[in-house]
Image: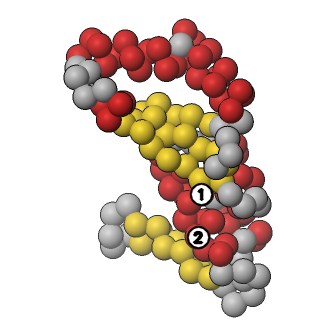
């Protein structure tokens, strides 16, 4: 219900899981869809969820407002020589003890951050 209700009822987009092809979600506009851009908004919303963002936190950003998107930075793209313990320590610095550093960055920049392995996914407005 996290996805189905807002996508189907608010955005007027049909959503279904294609069981013949693994990990395939299909979206199509309903006849009464108010705007064709709703399809792209729903795609980005579902992609954000698959990256690990909390659906409640990003739902309004993607489905109601313009100018929100997400991007991914690979930690090794910033410094290629990071390996093993150095990589783990770098990830730990981004998160901070108990997630405090990540939380501070999110609040200061009005963004949401997901750290997944070597990737840091950032969701917010372009201005943020």
* Residue 21, percent from left and from top: 32, 70
* Residue 32, percent from left and from top: 75, 87
**The disc label shown at residue 45, or none:** 1
Total labels: the figure holds 2
Can you tell which quarter of the image residue 97 is in? top right
One can see residue 125 in this view:
yes
Left or right relative to 43: residue 30: right
Can you tell which quarter of the image residue 80 is in? top left
- Note whether 128 is above or below 87 in the view shown: below
Q: Residue at x 55, y 40 (%)?
A: 122
Which sits in the foreground, 112 or 52?
112
* Residue 41, percent from left and from top: 63, 65
Quarter of the image with the N terminus in it: bottom right
Q: Which residue is mark 2?
A: 40
Quarter of the image with the C terminus in it: top right
Q: Secondary structure at mark 1?
A: helix
Left or right relative to 10: residue 20: left
- Note whether 44 is above or below 38 in the view shown: above
Judge the density around disc 1: few (<14), some (14-19), many (≥20) Cα neighbours within 10 Å.
many
Q: Secondary structure at mark 2?
A: helix
* Residue 104, percent from left and from top: 67, 20
Label located before the other in sequence (2 or 1): 2
Q: Residue at x 38, y 61 (%)?
A: 23
Q: Are marks 2 and 1 in contact (CB under 8 Å)?
A: no
Q: Residue at x 45, y 35 (%)?
A: 120
Can you tell which quarter of the image residue 44 is in? bottom right
- Note whether 36 is above or below 85 in the view shown: below
CA gap, disc 2 and disc 1: 9 Å
């Amino acid at each position: 219900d996290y996805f189905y209700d807002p996508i189907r009822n608010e955005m007027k987009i049909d959503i279904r899981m294609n069981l013949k092809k693994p990990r395939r979600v299909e979206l199509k506009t309903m006849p009464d869809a108010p705007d064709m851009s709703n399809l792209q908004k729903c795609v980005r919303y579902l992609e954000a969820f698959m990256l690990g963002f909390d659906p409640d936190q990003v739902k309004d950003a993607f489905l109601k407002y313009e100018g929100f998107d997400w991007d991914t930075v690979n930690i090794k793209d910033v410094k290629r020589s990071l390996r093993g313990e150095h990589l783990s320590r770098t990830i730990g610095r981004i998160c901070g003890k108990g997630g405090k550093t990540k939380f501070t960055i999110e609040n200061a920049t009005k963004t949401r951050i997901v750290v997944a392995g070597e990737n840091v996914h950032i969701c917010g407005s372009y201005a943020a």
